[in-house]
Image: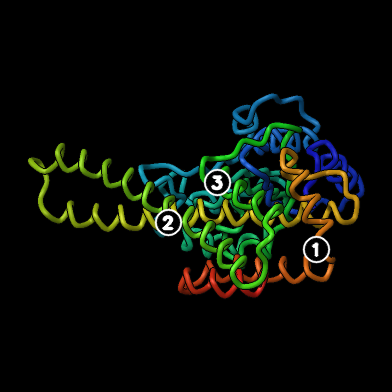
Amino acid sequence: MPFKPENALALLDRANQQGRLGHAYLITGPREADLNTFALDLLRLVTAKPRYNIEDFQKEGAYVLSPEGKSRRIVVGDQTGAAPNTMRHFIQHMQMSNGGRLKPALIQDAERMNDSAQNAFLRTLEEPPGGALFLLLTHNPRALLPTTRSRVIEIALLPPPGARIFTAYEEQLLTVLRQLSTRTTAGISGALALKAGFQEILEQLKTDIKKDLEDEFKKEQDHYKQTTDGSWLKQREEQIEAQIEANYQQQRDALMDLLLSWMGDVARQQVGGGQLDILPYQDATAALAQRWTPGQLHKRLAALRKLDQLLRTNVNESLALEVTFITAFG
């Protein structure tokens, strides 16, 4: 359940005072939730130090690991751990003795850790050094490996009221979902129409991502083709393909988040819950809450959660969408 930041801090303060503070937290929330400010507030709380920026905590030994380079990834680094801002350098720093005192560490944009970096981090998460407090910050928690998520305590934050901003693709999905609340067509045809609307958004998203990155690649080719050999070109082509897929998956995950948030609002409307994720569309989710029985809603939520998991595998996307939407809405 998402928390208002002040409520989450109150719960963590109580845990700290009772000696029950965990050693690793995954701080999540939509783009409008200020995860860095929450992390700073939490560090002030647990250290009882009036520091007003992360840099002051860094001067006192806190480690901040962030994505860097053109790929904007957090990589594992070589065996020596000598390269700064790599996972192995981070782990070596955290393993250094600190006299048992609190030793905080932030991993910003944690979803940008590649699989190798996350796998290297698992042992440290399982057997943390004395005094370690790991704060993993991400707006896209499902991009993390399940093994990483299983070893941290997730704290989902709500954005400030009225602060949520939707991308153009999210606005398109919300339009499709609003139409769902007024659509009279039911059964298989209605389910397939909903699937077609969602898939059209995904196809446009991938086309736009591909065009943007290929345009960028074209500029690089024009600049470097006279000064580099053909091996650079092939490597960069492979990097672009990987980046297209990574960007697409990340934004598709965000659309799935929005779809599940919509269904969550329908559930909250059914039980009279006051805090909605997508407040501007409360009339539409209220209409669906009235139309669907709790059993129907449970079935639809279960099917969409399963789809969310399937899309993280090598499943055929179009087939998975079709089967899910027919199961959920047919």
In the picture, the disc for residue 213 is none
Q: Position of residue 271 (x, y in %)?
A: 90, 55
Q: Residues within 10 Å of mark 1 (few under 14, many from 20)?
A: some
Residue at the spot of label 1 = 292
Q: Is residue 295 left or right of residue 38?
A: right
x 61%, y 62%: residue:
148
Measure the alpha-carbon separation of dots 2 and 1.
30 Å
Residue at the spot of label 3 = 172
Farthest-out residue, front = 184
126 and 220: which is toward the camera: 220
Mark found first going from the N terminus, 2 or 1: 2
Measure the alpha-carbon separation of dots 1 and 3.
23 Å
User: Depth-wise, is mark 2 or mark 1 nearer the camera?
Assistant: 1
Looking at the image, residue 158 lies above or below residue 266: above
Q: Amino acid at mark 3?
A: Gln
Q: Amino acid at mark 2?
A: Glu
In the picture, the disc for residue 203 is 2
x 58%, y 46%: residue:
107
Mark found first going from the N terminus, 3 or 2: 3
Q: Amino acid at mark 1?
A: Trp
Measure the alpha-carbon separation of dots 3 and 2.
12 Å
Q: Position of residue 202 (x, y in %)?
A: 47, 56
The answer to whether mark 2 and mark 1 are in CB contact below 8 A is no
Residue at disc 3, secondary structure = helix
Q: Position of residue 317 (x, y in %)?
A: 47, 69
104 and 301: which is toward the camera: 301
